């Protein structure tokens, strides 16, 4: 027993660069231990439009940026005002657990309050909101993910260097959110990559999206700065401490 406790698992090797706080992410989510609460519905503006975009391997994940001057906007859902989309990215192996279940993956759509000029400004005052969408294993490819998968494969096969963008045509954000967004968990947490800054309002939808094992495998071929395979890229779950997790009841 003693020996096992001393074994250090370092699949997520950048965790030690994280600040230590009492409101860290991700966490375990459970319907039973969440507090039921009513929230107004979200409103999404610009999520049904087609955008040209680009995707990069930042050494931790594949990040998608839209090429537009008019950022998609999110409001409602108990958020204080209007939030705009910065970018979205993927985790293979979900970061949040539901009960003891780790999903195949998780999409994070990172937003910040439109009262600030960019994500880093909003981060200093805790006005960042991330939408999390679980990806569950499916026997069939999820067609809406195909343009992403193709671009990720291109990054890997053509050995595109870190942070060099690869173009993607005609993305629709609605494809990366569940159709039914009525149910979600809500809690106050942090970014899950260094420095793991707190002040992030998390929304994790109870409905997920499908992904095939073949599609999932493409992500696991990406490499880090040290040229090692990113076989998984989730941060381990953190202590809840004295936080409350809310579960939307309609
Ligand atoms: C990914 O996860 C990127 C980061 C993101 C980080 O590495 O998407 O974003 C950029 C612009 O590189 O960090 C500040 C930020 O959004 C952490 O995001 S997460 O907490 O949602 N996993
Ligand atoms: Zn993330």
Image: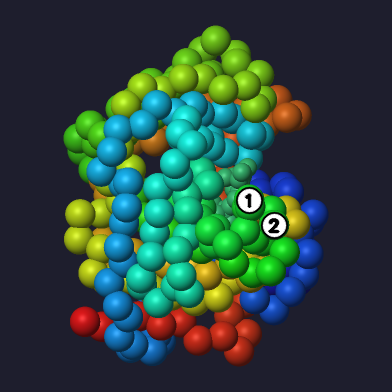
Number of the label disc, if any, that sits on residue 121? 2
Q: Residue furthest top?
A: 158
Q: Is residue 213 above or below residue 150?
A: below
- Queried on whether the Cβ of the residue with tag 2 lies below 8 angstroms from ligand 1, the answer reads no
Q: Position of residue 93 (x, y in %)?
A: 47, 49
Q: Which of the 4 image quarters holds residue 38?
A: bottom left
Q: Residue at the spot x=69%, y=79% of the render?
A: 22
In the image, 140 versus 58, the foreground residue is: 58
Q: Is residue 49 visible?
A: yes
Query: For the residue labelled by badge 1, is the local secondary structure a helix, a strand or a loop?
Result: loop
244 to the left or right of 208:
right
Query: For the residue labelled by badge 2, is the local secondary structure a helix, a strand or a loop?
Result: helix
Q: Is residue 11 above or below residue 100?
A: above
Q: Name the quarter where the C terminus is drawn.
A: bottom left
Which residue was labeled with disc 1?
118
Q: Are marks 2 and 1 in contact (CB under 8 Å)?
A: yes
Q: Residue at the spot x=62%, y=58% of the render?
A: 116
Q: Is residue 237 visible?
A: no
Q: Position of residue 29 (x, y in %)?
A: 43, 74
Number of the label disc, if any, that sits on residue 80? none
Q: Residue at the spot x=72%, y=47% of the render?
A: 13
Q: Name the quarter where the N terminus is drawn.
A: bottom right
């Amino acid at each position: 027993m003693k020996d096992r406790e001393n074994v250090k698992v370092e699949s997520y090797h950048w965790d030690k660069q994280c600040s230590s706080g009492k409101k860290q992410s991700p966490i375990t989510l459970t319907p039973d231990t969440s507090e039921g609460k009513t929230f107004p519905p979200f409103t999404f503006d610009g999520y049904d439009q087609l955008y040209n975009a680009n995707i990069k391997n930042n050494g931790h994940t594949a990040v998608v940026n839209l090429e537009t001057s008019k950022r998609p906007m999110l409001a409602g859902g108990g958020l204080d005002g209007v939030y705009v989309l910065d970018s979205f990215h993927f985790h293979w192996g979900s970061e949040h657990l539901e009960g003891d279940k780790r999903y195949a993956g998780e999409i994070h759509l990172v937003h910040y309050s439109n009262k600030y000029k960019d994500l880093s400004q909003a981060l200093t005052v805790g006005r960042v909101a991330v939408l999390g969408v679980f990806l569950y294993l499916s026997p069939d490819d999820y067609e809406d993910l195909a343009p992403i998968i193709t671009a990720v494969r291109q990054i890997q096969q053509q050995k595109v260097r870190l942070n060099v963008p690869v173009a993607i045509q005609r993305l629709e954000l609605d494809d990366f959110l569940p159709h039914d967004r009525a149910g979600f968990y809500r809690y106050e947490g942090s970014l899950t990559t260094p420095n793991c800054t707190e002040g992030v309002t998390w929304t994790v939808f109870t409905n997920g999206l499908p992904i095939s094992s073949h599609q999932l495998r493409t992500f696991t071929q990406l490499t880090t700065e040290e040229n090692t395979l990113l076989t998984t890229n989730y941060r381990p779950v953190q202590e809840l401490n004295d936080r409350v997790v809310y579960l939307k009841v309609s």
